[in-house]
Amino acid sequence: DTGVSQNPRHKITKRGQNVTFRCDPISEHNRLYWYRQTLGQGPEFLTYFQNEAQLEKSRLLSDRFSAERPKGSFSTLEIQRTEQGDSAMYLCASSYGTPAEQYFGPGTRLTVT
Amino acid sequence: TQLLEQSPQFLSIQEGENLTVYCNSSSVFSSLQWYRQEPGEGPVLLVTVVTGGEVKKLKRLTFQFGDARKDSSLHITAAQPGDTGLYLCAGVGRVGSNYKLTFGKGTLLTVNP
């Protein structure tokens, strides 16, 4: 069990560019979550997948954000036309069985210049 | 909107001291979790408390859930430098098949040798 992995760990991009992050959950975990964490704040829920179905999206997830989990395994989070306010740590978590016990990845830190 | 307030926001102590951090909510959660997050990493689950009045111990850490299931505390005995990190509480609420976590802003603990 290698835990939840996220790539890249760090991303620096210029405003207006598109970025895509990847999350590989723990094997056989059917639930996958994306969170955003800014400095001085706790993680904020963005979206949730059960298998390949995206079941819930936060109103924080603007039209510029899209997430997929095409085969119910890994997931991608894409941000189009990035803005400086998108700078944050993007965390992925997965769970199975006891759904409240979520296992977090190390996150992708995005800096938009 | 369910909000979790954590206090203090920052805490700097010397090795060997005891400390207590608090997590308060205006709403009732089905359970409450405590996480520790180190810089550049994702949160790691420490404990889940479910029953009002419940007390759980994890080595030098003692977690208590309030009788009304709206508040919780974390007490650390004889703190060590390895305890340094961001301590987050998260309320667990069920929405359909999803168990949504609502995080507080955290308490940033520094234990000086």
Image (cartoon, coloured by chain):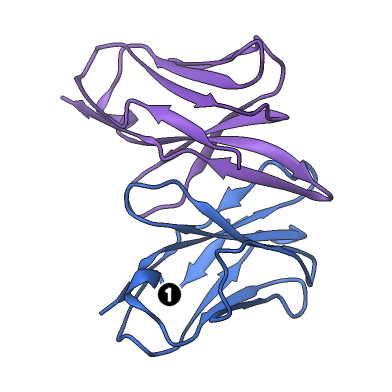
Residue at the location (66% across, 14% down)? B68
Q: Position of residue A90 (x, y in %)?
A: 47, 64
Q: Chain A is which colour?
A: blue
Query: Seen in the image, is A71 located left or right of residue A107?
Result: right
Q: Position of residue A87 (x, y in %)?
A: 35, 69
Q: Position of residue B3 (x, y in %)?
A: 54, 37
Q: Pointer 1: what residue?
A: A8
Q: Quadrant of residue B33?
A: top right
Q: Which chain is purple?
A: B
Mark 1 belongs to which amino acid? Pro
User: For this rendering, which residue is in front, B45 or A14?
Assistant: A14
Residue at the location (37% across, 89% down)? A16
Q: Residues within 10 Å of mark 1 (few under 14, many from 20)?
A: some
Q: Is residue B93 above or below residue A68?
A: above
Q: Quadrant of residue A45?
A: bottom right
Query: Seen in the image, is A100 located left or right of residue B112?
Result: right
Q: Is residue B92 above or below residue B14?
A: below
